[in-house]
Image (spheres, rainbow, N blue to C red):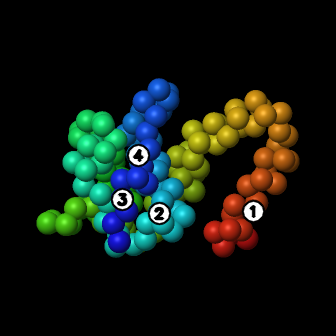
Amino acid sequence: MQPSTSCFHVNPASGVPIYRQLMDQVRALVASGRLAEGDLLPSVRQVAQDLQVNQMTVSKAYSLLERDGVVERVRGQGMRVNQASPRGTVKERQNELRPLLEQVVTQAFQLALTREQVLAALDPLFKERGHE
């Protein structure tokens, strides 16, 4: 299956670089199962055109995803999703998650949510994905 580029959205006004937004979205699609092993990513040209971003930005995102083992380049086909397998040590993966968690904590403070309330909100999300 090849997802449409409608799966991707970027916010140029965000403090997060566009290539990072794309990387995060691909990782989220893989984690949620919407992208499975063997699925092809939309072409660099198509994503760039649909999102009105530079092709080099999309290419950078795809190259970094390839470096991280999330996708692989298949000659004549494009970028294909690899089998989901954790890369790096637990500490390295936690460090990769940290920027997103910092955003969650900031948002939680703005919404006057306690630590316990945030953790309670996370629990069902893990359960939905089969992680008890």
Image disc number at residue 124: 1
Residue at x-position 76% and y-position 30% = 110
Residue 22 got which mark? 4
Residue ID for mark 3: 4
Q: Are the residues flagged by discs 2 and 1 in contact, CB closer than 8 Å?
A: no
Asked whether the beta carbons under mark 3 and mark 1 sit within 8 Å of each other, the answer is no
Q: Is residue 63 left or right of residue 98?
A: left
Give the crowd class for mark 2: few <14, some 14-19, many >=20 residues within 10 Å: many
Residue drawn where x is 41% and y is 46% of the image: 22
Could you tell me which quadrant the N terminus lies in?
Answer: bottom left
Q: Secondary structure at mark 3?
A: loop
For badge 4, the amino acid type reads Leu
- In terms of sequence position, does the residue under pointer 2 or pointer 1 come before the other? 2
- In primary-sequence order, the first of circles 2 and 3 is 3
The total of numbered circles placed on residues is 4
Q: Residues within 10 Å of mark 1 (few under 14, many from 20)?
A: few
Q: Is residue 86 visible?
A: no
Mark 2 residue type: Val
Q: How far is the residue under mark 1 from the one under mark 4?
A: 25 Å
Q: Which numbered disc, 3 or 1, marks the residue that appears first in the sequence?
A: 3
Could you say which disc has been placed on residue 30 in the image?
2
Q: Residues within 10 Å of mark 3 (few under 14, many from 20)?
A: few
